[in-house]
């Protein structure tokens, strides 16, 4: 029986706790980037598999752990999405799609997104403004829907 007080057992327990805390948001991001299904599950699993060696080296802890998990999730999703000519939204390039998923999808605060994407807050705000403009332009080109009047 392994010693429950050994550093290895404590590290494993800590990583399991980290997975329990982070797996929901990481899976949600995977679903937003890849659409729900096997690819999202695969990206989530690959994310934590890639983070485990960092955890064992004590390179993954504190406030940066969540950002690292999101960053790795984005990387894993990008690998799985390479064969797709367009991302799930169909309108945005990959970087804008990721930004949109973090802001509108899982609704992270700007400082957190800035840390995950490793960009300044003013740069992030400019990117979000561009995304809103693209979405508004796409919406304005949609055909008008005629609704019969109630009466």
Image (cartoon, rainbow, N blue to C red):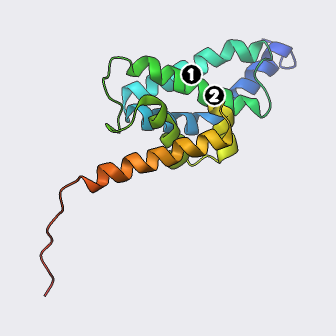
Q: On the picture, is 120 further left or further right than 139?
A: right
- Decide which of tag 1 and tag 2 comes sooner along the chain: 1
Residue 77 numbered mark, or none: none
What SS does tag 2 mark? Answer: helix
Residue 110 visible, this orientation: yes
Q: On the picture, is 88 further left or further right than 64?
A: left
Q: Give the CA separation, mark 1 to mark 2.
A: 7 Å
At 76% across and 26% down in the image, what residue appears? 14
Q: Position of residue 50 (x, y in %)?
A: 61, 15
Up-down relation of residue 39 to residue 31 (above or below):
above
Question: In which quadrant of the rendered image does the C terminus lie?
Answer: bottom left
Question: In which quadrant of the rendered image does the N terminus lie?
Answer: top right
Q: Position of residue 106 (x, y in %)?
A: 54, 45
Q: Position of residue 37 (x, y in %)?
A: 36, 31
What SS does tag 1 mark? Answer: helix
Residue 20 visible, this orientation: no
Query: Residue 119 sits in which quadrant?
Result: top right
At 39% across and 25% down in the image, what residue appears? 39
Between 80 and 15, the one lying in front of the other is: 80
Residue position for label 1: 47
Up-down relation of residue 80 to residue 139 (above or below):
above
Q: On the picture, is 22 further left or further right than 79?
A: right
Residue position for label 2: 69
Up-down relation of residue 85 to residue 137 (above or below):
above
Residue furthest bottom as drawn: 151
At 38% across and 37% down in the image, what residue appears? 92
How crowded is the residue under tag 2: few (<14 C-alpha within 10 Å), some, or many (20+)? many
Up-down relation of residue 60 to residue 20 (above or below):
above
> Is there a contact, CB below 8 Å, between mark 1 and mark 2?
yes
Query: Residue 2 sits in which quadrant?
Result: top right
At 37% across and 26% down in the image, what residue appears? 38
């Amino acid at each position: 029986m392994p010693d429950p007080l050994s550093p290895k057992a404590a590290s494993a327990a800590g990583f399991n706790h980290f997975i329990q805390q982070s797996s929901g948001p990481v899976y949600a991001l995977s679903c937003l980037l890849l659409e729900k299904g096997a690819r999202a599950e695969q990206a989530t699993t690959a994310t934590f598999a890639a983070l485990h060696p960092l955890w064992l080296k004590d390179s993954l802890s504190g406030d940066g752990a969540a950002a690292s998990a999101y960053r790795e999730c984005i990387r894993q999703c990008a690998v799985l999405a390479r064969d797709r000519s367009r991302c799930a939204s169909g309108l945005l390039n990959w970087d804008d799609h990721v930004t949109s998923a973090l802001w509108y999808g899982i609704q992270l605060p700007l400082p957190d997104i800035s840390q995950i994407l490793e960009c300044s807050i003013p740069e992030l705000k400019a990117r979000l403004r561009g995304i809103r403009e693209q979405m508004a332009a796409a919406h304005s080109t949609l055909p008008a829907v005629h609704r019969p009047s109630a009466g």
